[in-house]
Amino acid sequence: MIGFGAFVLCRGMLFSWITLNTSRVMHDRLLARILHSTMDFFQRTPLARLVNAFGPNLAIVDDLLPDSMLNILQFVPLLLGALALIMINNYWTVIPCVAVWILVIPFTKFTNPSIAVLGQQEALAQPHALSHVTASVQGVSTIKAFTCESQFVDTFEGRMNRLHNFTSALYHVQLWLALQLDSIASILVFIVGILCVIYAQSIVTASLMGLIMSNAMQLIVFVKWVNRDVAETRARVPAVLTSEYYATQPPIEANFIVTERTPPSDWPQTGQISFDKAVLHYNKEGLPVLKDVTLNIRGGEKIGIVGRTGAGKSTLLNSLLRMYELSEGTIVVDGINIAETGLHQLRDKIGVIPQGMIRFVISCQILLTNVH
Ligand SMILES: Nc1ncnc2c1ncn2[C@@H]1O[C@H](COP(=O)(O)OP(=O)(O)OP(=O)(O)O)[C@@H](O)[C@H]1O
Ligand SMILES: [Mg+2]
């Protein structure tokens, strides 16, 4: 008894350690990739998708999948054990046991693809609905100004309906499969019972019959749980794959530190900035926003750049911070081509007060000199 308790405790601890470690690694990889992603990626990706990748999808890895896997590891041996016990004690039951389990194959073959597809569609529909909420909140003043509230409410309802369609269909497919498997398990119990009665005198004693029947009855429970957890795992895998996608696929920025080209600690000494035929595209397919910009700002010079809205003033600053990389040309600051330095090494040396109205309640000097 003590040995069994110790074994269960060790198994639980080992399993928890493995699953916690896996979800921690997955979270860290996802966070590192997203934090290193390019600005372009953030513009193309709705925020709700990222929230989904970090929230509900990781909750599945943290919580739901370990539970399902532990149940599968627990119930599959019990199920096989119960079947083996029934067949060993009355070998005539081998035929119905094998025959009935062959019946299971078409049912699972029929439902497994549906569960996978519905799980995938549900994982896609969730951020689709969420992103509409975040976009609507961001543009609420515009929506109100054009009195388009009902249009946005309708779109939201449409997307929520679509999401619930998948959730409900998934639930009902799982329920349908559970019902079929329960029926098959019940048929097996019935046949085993009949065979026990037929061979009551010759092979099966009364006590053995009790043992066989109690195990046969347990089959119904084991089948239900194994099926539920396998179906749950199958349905949730696409959501996990979405997080995995964001942990591996987003394009990432250049290296933060380039040790072999570390600028001197007092760089930039004077602040001389030279643009040489700089070309910058926000989108690979789009037109360039900076076109062959060549200018030279001497060290210590105070410069104001003037232009109508959309002329490219902020873009000039973005290119200096390498928020977007130049497609052609170079930017040299005090003799160092900024494309060759690490991003942290560059951005650490440049102070910016952005155009947006968000500002920390600290002095301009601290903001500019990046003391904190
Ligand atoms: N992230 C972006 N993706 C695609 N195009 C952009 C992006 N940011 C700016 N643009 C486009 O690049 C051009 C230059 O924009 P930019 O913001 O640099 O202008 P600006 O001179 O700073 O304008 P403003 O005076 O309004 O601040 C504009 O046509 C703008 O639509
Ligand atoms: Mg601007």
Image (cartoon, helix red, strand yellow):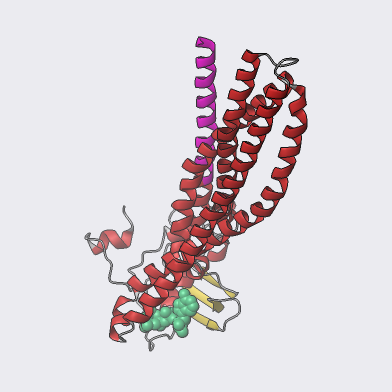
* Residue 14 lies within the magenta run: yes
Q: Looking at the image, can residue 298 be seen?
A: no
Q: Looking at the image, can residue 109 be seen?
A: yes
Where is residue 34 drawn, in percent x and y? Answer: 50, 56
Name the residue located 41 percent from the left edge and 70 percent from the top edge. 132
Where is residue 206 drawn, in percent x and y? Answer: 63, 14
**42 up-or-down from 31: above or below:** below
Q: Main secondary structure of the magenta part?
A: helix
Picture quarter with ligand 2: bottom left
Where is residue 262 drawn, in percent x and y? Answer: 53, 53
Name the residue located 51 percent from the left edge and 41 percent from the top edge. 23
Quadrant in the picture for residue 277: bottom right
Q: Residue furthest bottom?
A: 308
**54 up-or-down from 126: above or below:** above
Closer-to-camera residue (176/144) = 176
Quadrant in the picture for residue 209: top right
Quadrant in the picture for residue 242: bottom right
Closer-to-camera residue (122/257) = 122
Where is residue 149 drawn, in percent x and y? Answer: 32, 80
Closer-to-camera residue (265/130) = 130
Question: In the visual, does 175 lie left or right of 87?
Answer: left
Question: In the visual, does 188 lie left or right of 74?
Answer: right
Name the residue located 68 percent from the left edge and 23 percent from the top edge. 197
* Residue 310 lies within the magenta run: no
Instruction: Give the magenta range.
Output: 1-26
Closer-to-camera residue (180/6) = 180
